[in-house]
Amino acid sequence: MANATTAKYEQLVLELATATSPATFARLCGLLDVTITRSANVDTTEVPDCDDESLPLSIEKQVRSIEISVSATGVWAQESHELLSDWFYSSTTLPARIGHLNALTGDTEYETGTALLTILTNTRAKGQKVKADIELMFDGTPTRSVKV
């Protein structure tokens, strides 16, 4: 029996474009916990049996669309303060990417696309550092690029 090859913490990264021409990506400073959610929006159709309509309907499903979102929590870092604030208040998309740095050659290494910053939360607690929670949603389906 062989053990699964796993990824280390630093091998799953969230990066944001700091320049667009050429695209230069950097990791958002301070974010410690990152969750990537890929979900399919599914339509359901009830289909009758043509030979015997008394039978229960068959349920058929089809993917209508997919969406990818990222939520992250950590500390509120000076290095990301203006970038995140500007992104939120601009209400515009910015290039973002998810990196799978331990991908095998030929497997998906990056998922890249434009994203909206939909949630930006700061929390303070006495005796603690200021915390940050963000959520971003990709605008469309990210492009998958393989590791070479």
Image (cartoon, rainbow, N blue to C red):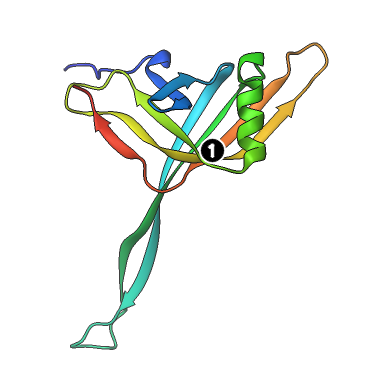
- The residue lying at 38 percent from left, 25 percent from top is 22
Element type at mark 1 = strand
Looking at the rendered image, the quarter that the N terminus falls into is top left
For residue 12, say whether it is visible.
yes
As drawn, the residue found furthest toward the front would be 21
Question: Which residue is under mark 1?
Answer: 136
- Between 101 and 125, the one nearer to me in the picture: 101
User: What residue is rendered at 73% in x and 18% in y?
Assistant: 130
Q: Which part of the image, by quadrant, shows the C terminus?
A: top left
Q: Position of residue 76 (x, y in %)?
A: 67, 19
Q: How many numbered marks are there?
A: 1
Q: Residues within 10 Å of mark 1 (few under 14, many from 20)?
A: many
Residue type for callout 1: Leu
**Image position of 34 (left or right of 147):** right
Percent from the top left, x then y, of residue 137? 50, 42
The single residue placed furthest to the right in the displayed view is 126
Instruction: Between residue 125 and residue 3, name the one nearer to us.
Output: 125
Q: Position of residue 143 (x, y in %)?
A: 31, 39
State the image coordinates of residue 65 (x, y, percent, origin top left).
38, 56
* Rendered image quadrant of residue 9: top left
Q: Is residue 111 above or below residue 132?
A: below
Q: Residue at x 38, y 60 (%)?
A: 42
Image position of 34 (left or right of 134)? left
- Horizontal relation, residue 121 to residue 104: left or right: right
Q: Residue furthest top?
A: 127
Residue 16 seen by the camera = no
Determine whether 71 is above or below 138 in the image: above
